[in-house]
Amino acid sequence: METQIEIPPAIFNTIVNATKVAALTGAGVSAESGVPTFRGENGLWRNRRPEELASMEGFLDDPRLVWDWYDWRRTTIASLKPNDGHYALAEMETVYENFTLVTQNVDGIHALAGSRDPVEMHGNIWYVRCLKEGTVMENREAPLQRIPPLCPKCNTMVRPNIIWFGEELDTETIKRAGSAARESEVFFVIGTSSVVQPAASLAGLAQRNGAVVVEVNLERTPLTDSVDLFLEGPSGKILPDLLRRICRARGFDV
Ligand code: OAD
């Protein structure tokens, strides 16, 4: 059954007729697939300071602790499947002429659902980087046989190829994310607490450049007061419902 989400007609028309659309996703989009979110009661930080598990200082202090945490996350994610929210976002690429998916998630599940080229702002948990040479390699071993894992070329320890606290985002990535936000007519913000920068600023950037900002979340966030439309509920339900309504209004088969 479809959820009865109220959308003011002017906003709905913009959503239906837009050609340039972008979406920013966060951990909440993968929650219905079984990936724990970061914040909240049973959050991924496991009552530790995020910097212990996700900063270069924390890693150099205790590489085994950090790799144990990543190995646990990788092993959990390895068996999980995309949910209807991921599939709806992949489908949006075929509905809109120009659709860019920007994600803070490192789980790689958007690509599994069929999203062709998601902008992964924080990296990808299935890639590692050699501490000596900086070489980035795919590594899908889960669980890892050796912790910490070593570079197959030079035997130096590798680190997860993730953007950690205190680190700069990749220049090309930030450029793509910024352009997508600036150029969009509709900007969706889905399943993110909107507290981590620079991702949290993309919605404001989009809005200042004329986009209608639509937030989908189970609860209100620091962004909610400034968005044009807040859709409260699980993304795995809201997004497929919204997509069906968009397709129907555009005269596509659903
Ligand atoms: P958070 O854990 O901070 O927030 C998850 C958000 O998803 C919350 O606002 C929840 O209310 C919402 N949520 C949960 N389940 C949902 C569902 N089924 N449908 C819709 N919304 C749902 O995760 P992020 O905002 O992604 O960075 O965190 C941002 C960054 O902080 C992460 O990428 C990570 C972390 O530090 C790094 O590790 C670099």
Image (tube, helix red, strand yellow):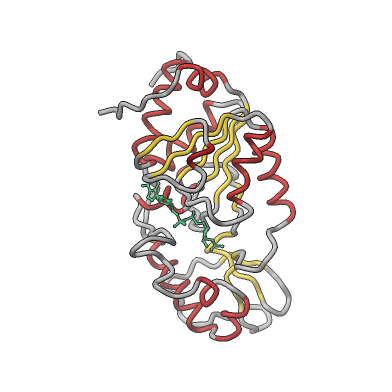
User: Outermost residue, left direction?
Assistant: 1
Up the image or down, 122 lies above or below 222; here it is: below
Q: Tell me: 185 left or right of 32.
A: right
Please state which of residues 174 and 72 is positioned toward the viewer in this rendering. 174
- Residue shown at 50% from the left, 34% from the top: 214
Q: State which quadrant residue 58 falls in.
A: bottom right
Residue 170 percent coordinates (x, y): 70, 58
Residue 244 percent coordinates (x, y): 39, 25
> How many badges with numbers are in the image?
0
User: Outermost residue, front direction?
Assistant: 225
- Residue shown at 37% from the left, 51% from the top: 81
Q: Tell me: 87 left or right of 198.
A: left
Please state which of residues 122 and 159 is positioned toward the viewer in this rendering. 122
Please state which of residues 26 and 250 is positioned toward the viewer in this rendering. 26
If the image is split into quadrants, where does the N terminus sit?
top left
Up the image or down, 22 lies above or below 140; here it is: above
If the image is split into quadrants, where does the C terminus sit?
top left
Residue 21 percent coordinates (x, y): 59, 31
Q: State which quadrant residue 134 falls in.
A: bottom right
Up the image or down, 79 lies above or below 93; here it is: below
Up the image or down, 169 lies above or below 200; here it is: below
- Residue shown at 55% from the left, 44% from the top: 24
